[in-house]
Amino acid sequence: MNNYLISQEIGSYRKPKELSSVFHKIYGSDEFYRLAEKATIETVKEFEKAGLNNIGVGGEMFRWEMYEHQANRINGIKFYGPVRSFDNRYYKKGSIIEDMGIKESYHSDELKFLLSQNYENIKIPVTGPYTMMDWSFNEHYNDRYETAMAFAGLLNNEIKDLKKLWDSKFPNKKLQIQLDEPATTTHPDEMNIVVDSLNKSVENIDNCEVSIHVCYSSDYKLLYDVMNDIKIDGLNLEFANRDTLENGIDDSKRIGYQDLKYFNELNDKKKFIGLGVTDVHIDYVEPVELIKDRINYTLKILPPDLIRLNPDCGLRTRSREISYQKLKNMDIAKKEILKEIE
């Protein structure tokens, strides 16, 4: 039963005010690392108290935003100005002006700290090549395919470096990598670019568990259609945001989860699904019974060993108090269901 309904954190978490209020002013300094490390430990304690099996990287306290964090570490990208992201935060959008190369590792400092604390139930989120391409201006490469593959080559080197660090501490344990790809289904005619760039990102990397995280897609079926061609072990997706808040396990109540039937029909390689059971865009804390209904509806479609539990996305747009309550209710729902299926 230990492998049933694994609960996981899959993204960002609200930073403590002492870090968020000075983040950009002190970024990269000794004081920044002191505060980021302190915030990571505090957040991991919250995750553990909430009952999470997997703590991600402790809420991404070392990062401000998923695109800019990586783009800042790449040679060949020039920044012209800020653009607004979906949650009303701004990030610098870059333009590619020459061949790209890694200036410095994206996440080694973060992983080194996690390893120094002996955390092993972690999963490292990295922004995927298709999203990096789609969110950048391109003044250099021939087309979108070539641009995405260039980002994929950089990410492949980064993951290999992270794997070396991981193996120095846990040589016999799989490193978990999550490829964050919110742009994946925004251009339906480019799913071949998605597949090829993701596969290049994880090329020649052994003993890793690789998942993809896609939030707020208008049509996950585009992803399901190609998922067996992508070298990933699972998909961490959003469902609660499109669901009703009514109790029940019939189709009319669980409208947000119905396309899992299509996923199951195509899932030839038995990839797991990271099931979004709490909406990260509302303060309403879903009751345990509602979360249980969402899980039980999914259990009518998929076996429990292929289901993991998570919020729809990162929780940084909610307060830490609300976020904790959502995670805690998810854990209570999980434990009650595990007793029932035993």
Image (cartoon, rainbow, N blue to C red):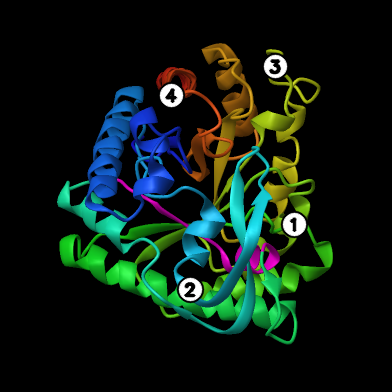
Where residue 99 appears, as percent x and y from the top left, is 57, 86
* Mark-to-mark CA distance, 4 and 2: 32 Å
The secondary element bearing badge 1 is classed as loop
Where is 134 relative to 328, above or below? below
Q: Which residue is mark 3?
A: 245
Pointers 4 and 2 in contact (C-beta within 8 Å) = no
Pointers 2 and 3 in contact (C-beta within 8 Å) = no
Question: Among all residues in the image, which is located at the extreme front?
Answer: 25
Pointers 3 and 4 in contact (C-beta within 8 Å) = no
Which amino acid does the dot numbered 1 rest on? Answer: Thr
Where is 280 relative to 231, above or below? above
Left or right, 277 with respect to 141, comes to left
The secondary element bearing badge 4 is classed as helix
Q: Which residue is mark 1?
A: 185
Pointers 1 and 2 in contact (C-beta within 8 Å) = no
Left or right, 325 with respect to 245, comes to left
Question: How would you rate the neighbour count of disc 2 (Cα within 10 Å): few for under 14, some for 14-19, many for 20 or more?
Answer: many
Q: Nearer the viewer, mark 4 or mark 2?
A: 2
The secondary element bearing badge 2 is classed as strand
Q: Which residue is mark 2?
A: 74
Tally of marks:
4
What is the span of residues highlighted in magenta in the rendered image?
Answer: 121-135
Q: Which residue shows up at 24% across the image and 37% down it? A: 38
Left or right, 275 with respect to 189, comes to left
Q: N-terminal of the two: label 2 or label 3?
A: 2
Q: Which mark is residue 320?
A: 4
Left or right, 56 with respect to 239, comes to left
Q: Nearer the viewer, mark 3 or mark 4?
A: 4
Where residue 84 appears, as percent x and y from the top left, is 68, 46
* Mark-to-mark CA distance, 2 and 3: 43 Å
The answer to if 123 sits in the magenta stretch is: yes
